[in-house]
Image (cartoon, rainbow, N blue to C red):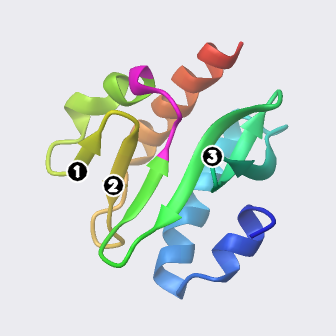
Amino acid sequence: MADVDDYFASLDAPARAAFERVRALAEELAPDAEQGLSYGLAALRHKGKPLLGFKAARDHLAVFPFSPAAVDVVRERLTGYSLSKGTIRFTTDMPLPDDVVRDLIRQRLGEIG
């Protein structure tokens, strides 16, 4: 996979639409973000550092902000979602709220500087 566009093109329509919405929100706050790979994931990069990774699994979608602190900033608003140290899992039936995505991206941008 060469970049985010290529990865999204390989997904079914519902997964692609869910990720496109997350990417659009991220690009609102980081319009200069570049597509690429980070840690083997299709990802947006900001100032050469990973901003947000994307991965679709059989039964969920996941975003990776590459930062446990970023996940912690939104953790309390994600009751019912599956979270781990650096991953937020969701489904097309239960997408991530826009304000959560924006706050996640704001936190990560602050960390990148």
Reading the chain from its start, which is encountered first: label 1 or label 3? 3
Q: Which residue is mark 2?
A: 89
From the viewer's perspective, is 37 left or right of 61?
Answer: right
From the viewer's perspective, is 70 left or right of 50?
Answer: left
Residue lying at the far left of the rendered structure: 80
- The answer to if 67 sits in the magenta stretch is yes
Q: From the viewer's perspective, is residue 61 above or below residue 80?
A: below
Reading the chain from its start, which is encountered first: label 3 or label 2? 3
From the viewer's perspective, is 14 left or right of 52?
Answer: left
Mark 2 Cα-neighbour bin, 10 Å: few <14, some 14–19, many ≥20: many
**Numbered disc in front, either 3 or 2:** 3
From the viewer's perspective, is 41 left or right of 2?
Answer: left
- The answer to if 35 sits in the magenta stretch is no
Q: From the viewer's perspective, is residue 86 above or below residue 56?
A: above
Determine the secondary structure under disc 1.
strand
Q: From the viewer's perspective, is residue 16 above or below residue 39?
A: below
Reading the chain from its start, which is encountered first: label 2 or label 1? 1
Q: Amino acid at mark 2?
A: Arg
Q: Residue at x 54, y 86 (%)?
A: 13
